[in-house]
Image (cartoon, coloured by chain):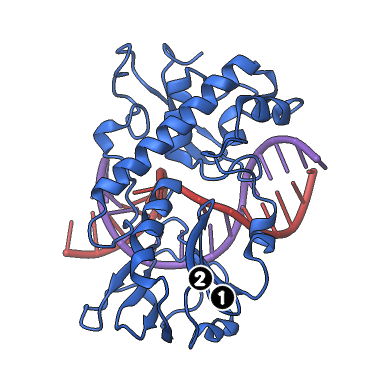
Chain colours: A blue, B purple, C red
Amino acid sequence: MPELPEVETCCRGIAPHISQQLVSNIILRHSRLRWPVPDTIVEMIGQTIHTVSRRGKYLLLSADSGTAIFHLGMSGSLRIVSAETTLRKHDHIDIEFTNKTILRFHDPRRFGALLWTRSNPLQHPLLAKLGPEPLSKIFTGDYLFKLSRKRNTNIKQFIMDSQIVVGVGNIYANESLFHAGIRPTLAAGKISLARYELLVAAIKKVLTYAIKRGGTTLRDFVGGDGNPGYFSQELFVYGRAGDTCKRCKKILREIRLGQRTTVYCLGCQK
DNA sequence: CCCTGAACCTGACCGC
DNA sequence: TGCGGTCAGGTTCAGG
């Protein structure tokens, strides 16, 4: 699923097809997702989508009286389809528009979500406490350095905490730490400001590249199907445990941190 | 407040 | 071919 670059790619892909379009119907084939889709979602029928935006890994479709909030979880995807498109297993939700296009949500594991809020979506409980966008100017080495003082957690879990910064998932956390030369197990509170500057630069570089990459893969409107914007060949550590480091040729090591697979190079990351 | 681990769910893959 | 175990890109929540 989707990490931030994939969600951004999805957002850009579907926006031209549904912006300013009128919702004619919503079909819920399976509403038991991460949370049940609220009954109030039907309010969207008869309303126009004004903007399609992203906050962290949440997609926001703002309509007349409220906003639909999508999250793709681990295996979710959104596609623009037509009435003739064959239904696949796990195609749980259709949002139909008067121009005949359909926004179709597919999610085998059902860790995704669709919610509806009548107030400012940024004030929604799930979004209110999110940290800054990683590509914004307020996300700096200084910011991470200050927040990390007295934190004993390892640096990898620290940067994957969405209250610290949004959008750094497992793939990009591993990759960013490699590029910054930082060992994932280090206590966040013991890392210097200079190293946090390197880390922030790496995170921005990796995410920006992946978004650019996603944009090149993006064709018709599809927003990804659980695969990263990266081509696996371009990854330096994620999924490469036991293989040799592309930089120093040492064997990449794999450990578990916070229940997530972590891969790093003993030679390049100190 | 901080940290850890369980939980949510399906499918793919691997060894026997 | 089938069976059991393991793993997967995320996030919330309970409990210490």
Residue that mark 1 sits on: A36
How far across and down, in percent of the image, does residue A59 sit?
49, 61
Q: Is residue A207 above or below residue A120?
A: above
Write the residue at 36% across / 74% down.
A103
Neighbourhood count class around disc 2 (C-alpha, 10 Å): few under 14, some 14–19, many 20 upward: some
Picture residue at 48% right of the left edge, 42% below the top: A169
User: Which residue sits at x=36%, y=36%?
Assistant: A209
Q: Kindly identify the amino acid type of the residue bearing the numbered disc 2.
A: Leu
Q: Is residue A99 above or below residue A77?
A: below
Please, what is the three-letter code of the amino acid marked with disc 1? Pro
Q: Is residue A264 at all visible to an observer of this figure? A: yes
Nearer to us in this view, A167 or A30 = A167
Residue at point 47% right, 79% down? A48
Residue A243, percent across and down?
29, 23
Pointer 2 residue: A33
Residue A21 pos. (x, y %): 40, 78
Contact (CB < 8 A) between labels 2 and 1?
A: yes
